């Protein structure tokens, strides 16, 4: 892949991101010590396993960041049908994943608070911080709205015949069920990998001409009048 070839580089970057991001998301779920506990009282778990929390939060952060070029690529494919809806849902998805990425810093603070203070006291302090209206309305709600935007963008791609109809449902179900360890992690993780991966694979496999939209251009006299 040549960095000087804008068409091929952007196509492969977008497609590869949609394949790698869900794999990282699944990996982060497996590494997270609190999720691996499978429910119940998890107070103090982050404080006991600082290294695992550090790795898990970093991987999860990058799983959201790497969705950005993938979402931009999905928006790029919406060219002739439902363009406005594609832009709205795509923009919402971009804002959402950026906010979710920022929220991953909270894992580090929870871990340090539970290590430095009595675990229950540290966890309560972390809950107070994340219950702040600025966090709720500035990060959490936009983040979840962004996931719905990603789902909507997937539906637009399916409507435009750029993705299979089941892909957006698999992405949505996978993201929300993967944190339920262990069955949800396995099934949800695979759903997310399959849903986003099939779109990414289609982007990787398409020709540069199809990606650039050359095949969408009208032909004949109409083309010459534009």
Image (cartoon, grey):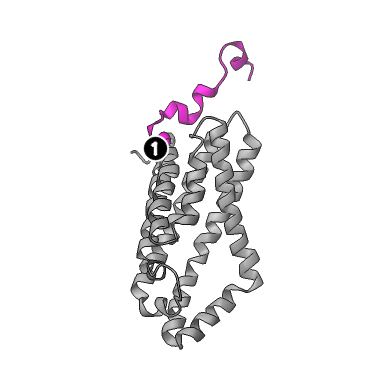
Closest to the observer: 82 or 118? 118
Please name the residue shown 50% across and 61% down the image: 101
Closest to the observer: 219 or 194? 194
Please indicate whether residue 117 sits to the left or right of residue 23 in the image: right
Closest to the observer: 219 or 136? 136
Above-or-below relation of 60 to 17: below
Above-or-below relation of 37 to 207: below
Residue 115 horizontal/vertical position (percent): 41, 84
Residue 90 horizontal/vertical position (percent): 58, 45
> Is label 1 in a helix, a strand or a loop?
helix
Closest to the observer: 35 or 85? 35
Please name the residue shown 42% across and 34% down the image: 202
Which residues fall within the magenta stretch?
Answer: 201-226
Residue holding disc 1:
201
**Magenta includes 219?**
yes
Residue 126 horizontal/vertical position (percent): 53, 78
**Callout 1: 10 Å neighbours few (<14), some, many (20+)?**
some
Please indicate whether residue 90 sits to the left or right of residue 209 in the image: right
Magenta segment, prevailing SS (helix, strand or loop): helix
Let me know if residue 31 appears in the view.
yes
Let me know if residue 10 appears in the view.
no
Quadrant location of the N terminus?
Answer: top left
Please name the residue shown 36% across and 80% down the image: 48
Residue 168 horizontal/vertical position (percent): 51, 42
């Amino acid at each position: 892949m040549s960095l000087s070839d804008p068409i091929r580089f952007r196509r492969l970057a977008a497609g590869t991101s949609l394949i790698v991001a869900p794999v990282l998301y699944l990996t982060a779920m497996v590494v997270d010590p609190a999720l691996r506990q499978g429910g119940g009282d998890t107070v103090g778990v982050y404080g006991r396993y600082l290294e695992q929390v550090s790795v898990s939060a970093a991987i999860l952060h990058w799983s959201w960041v790497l969705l950005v070029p993938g979402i931009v690529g999905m928006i790029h494919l919406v060219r002739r049908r439902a363009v406005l809806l594609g832009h709205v849902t795509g923009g919402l998805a971009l804002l959402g994943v950026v906010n979710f990425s920022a929220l991953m810093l909270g894992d580090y603070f929870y871990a340090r608070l539970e290590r430095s203070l009595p675990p229950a006291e540290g966890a309560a302090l972390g809950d107070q911080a994340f219950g702040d209206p600025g966090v709720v309305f500035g990060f959490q709600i936009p983040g979840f709205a962004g996931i719905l935007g990603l789902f909507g963008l997937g539906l637009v791609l399916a409507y435009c015949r750029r993705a299979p109809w089941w892909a957006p449902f698999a992405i949505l179900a996978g993201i929300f069920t993967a944190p339920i360890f262990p069955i949800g992690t396995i099934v949800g993780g695979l759903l997310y990998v399959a849903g986003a991966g099939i779109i990414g694979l289609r982007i990787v496999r398409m020709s540069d001409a199809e990606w650039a939209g050359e095949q969408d251009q009208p032909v004949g006299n109409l083309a010459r009048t534009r």
